[in-house]
């Protein structure tokens, strides 16, 4: 099995069929078919459902696609590293980042990595913690920055980036002397329970036996802060959420006892020791440290 066959398989998945893959690879459709037949014969497995026209990838085919992409990336990185300086990383990384970290940390992380490792290409996407961890497990992402999960699949490993305190954000007009009174009496803008932070907030409110008057549920920190800034309600968010806001009327209040979340990098166990993943982790840690406790 050659790397060329795996590239063709990945292109079929990306383009949607044999014909489109052939056009993008500048080869004939019959050449694509022959390469896929050779793969199936070597692996002694059927990769496509040929009862439909055009043929489509079956379950075995998609499984091989995910693994093939990882091998292609590693092959390209190995090939490029032959010509790289000893300390320079070459290749590509596919990463996922939860929205809170994408807004506050990711831009500076990408800037530093570009300066230190110009030959390292980062493909980043934003999503929910559970979704990103699933993609890491499937090999569709090399690593992801997520809220630490309660349970971790056996093939994955996590490394701590930082621990963040979740704080109550409120406009001057909605501040009361007692935080619990604020939670009970003021309109509450809930962070989506599908998000890792939202889950922690919901658990904290439940443990305090606090019933909030939730008027909205959103999955964007920027949108929630925009609502809070207008005095439409209060919200519990990671402490660094206000880093880019400069409105003195916005208040950041601690809960008692404090509520915290761990921001971690998750990767497959065999990827944790890769130099590119290690550099990504240390860069996130460095940027988070510069932002302050």
Image: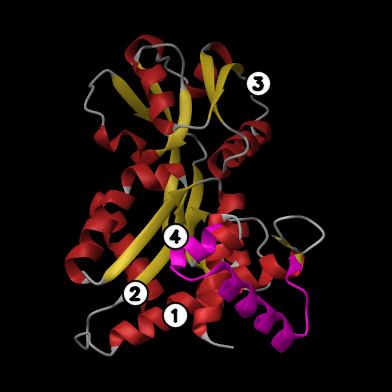
What residue did someone put label 4 on?
95
Left or right: 113, with 203 as reference point:
left
Question: Which one is in front, 206 or 144?
Answer: 144
Q: In the image, residue 168 lies at what x, y percent?
A: 44, 29
What residue did someone put label 3 on?
211
Secondary element at tag 4: strand
Does the stretch in magenta take in 40?
yes
Q: In the image, residue 146 lies at what x, y percent?
A: 50, 54
Q: Are marks 3 and 1 in contact (CB under 8 Å)?
A: no
Q: Is residue 177 above or below residue 98?
A: above
Circle count: 4
Which one is earlier in the sequence, the residue at label 1 or at label 2? 1
Q: In the image, residue 212 lies at what x, y percent?
A: 61, 19
Secondary element at tag 3: loop
Q: Point out the frontmost of discs 3 and 1.
A: 1
Which one is earlier in the sequence, the residue at label 4 or at label 3? 4
Q: Residues within 10 Å of mark 2 (few under 14, many from 20)?
A: many
Span of residues in magenta: 20-48
What residue did someone put label 2 on?
91
Q: Residues within 10 Å of mark 1 (few under 14, many from 20)?
A: some
Q: Is residue 227 above or below residue 64?
A: above
- Residue at (58%, 63%) from the top-left corner? 12
Q: Label 1 to label 4, Cα distance in Å?
A: 15 Å
Q: Point out the frontmost of discs 2 and 4.
A: 2
Q: Label 3 to label 1, Cα distance in Å?
A: 51 Å
Question: Which one is in front, 146 or 240?
Answer: 146
Residue 139 shows which numbered tag?
Answer: none
Which one is earlier in the sequence, the residue at label 3 or at label 2? 2
Q: Residues within 10 Å of mark 3 (few under 14, many from 20)?
A: few
- Residue at (57%, 75%) from the top-left corner? 31
What residue did someone put label 1 on?
74
Screen quadrant of the N terminus: bottom right
């Amino acid at each position: 099995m050659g790397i060329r066959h795996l590239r063709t398989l990945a292109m079929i998945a990306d383009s949607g069929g044999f014909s489109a893959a052939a056009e993008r690879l500048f080869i004939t459709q019959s050449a694509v078919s022959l390469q896929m037949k050779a793969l199936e014969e070597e692996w002694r497995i059927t990769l496509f459902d040929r009862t439909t026209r055009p043929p489509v990838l079956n379950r075995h085919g998609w499984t091989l696609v995910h693994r093939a992409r990882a091998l292609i990336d590693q092959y390209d990185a190995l090939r490029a590293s032959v010509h790289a300086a000893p300390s320079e990383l070459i290749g590509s990384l596919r990463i996922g980042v939860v929205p809170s970290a994408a807004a506050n940390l990711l831009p500076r992380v990408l800037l530093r990595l570009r300066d230190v490792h110009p030959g390292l290409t980062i493909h980043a996407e934003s999503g929910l913690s559970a979704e990103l961890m699933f993609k890491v497990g499937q090999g569709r992402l090399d690593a992801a920055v997520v809220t630490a999960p309660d349970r971790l699949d056996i093939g994955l490993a996590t490394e701590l980036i930082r621990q963040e305190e979740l704080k109550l954000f409120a406009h001057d007009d909605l501040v009361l002397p007692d935080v619990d009174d604020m939670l009970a009496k003021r309109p509450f803008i809930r962070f989506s329970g599908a998000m890792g932070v939202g889950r922690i907030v919901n658990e904290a409110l439940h443990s305090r036996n606090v019933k909030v008057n939730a008027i909205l549920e959103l999955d964007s920190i920027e949108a929630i802060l925009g609502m809070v800034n207008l005095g439409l309600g209060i919200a519990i968010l990671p402490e660094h959420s206000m880093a880019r806001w400069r409105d003195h009327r916005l208040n950041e209040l601690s809960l008692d006892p404090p509520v915290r979340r761990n921001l971690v990098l998750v990767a497959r166990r065999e990827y944790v020791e890769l130099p590119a993943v290690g550099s990504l982790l240390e860069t996130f840690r460095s940027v988070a440290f510069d932002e302050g406790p």
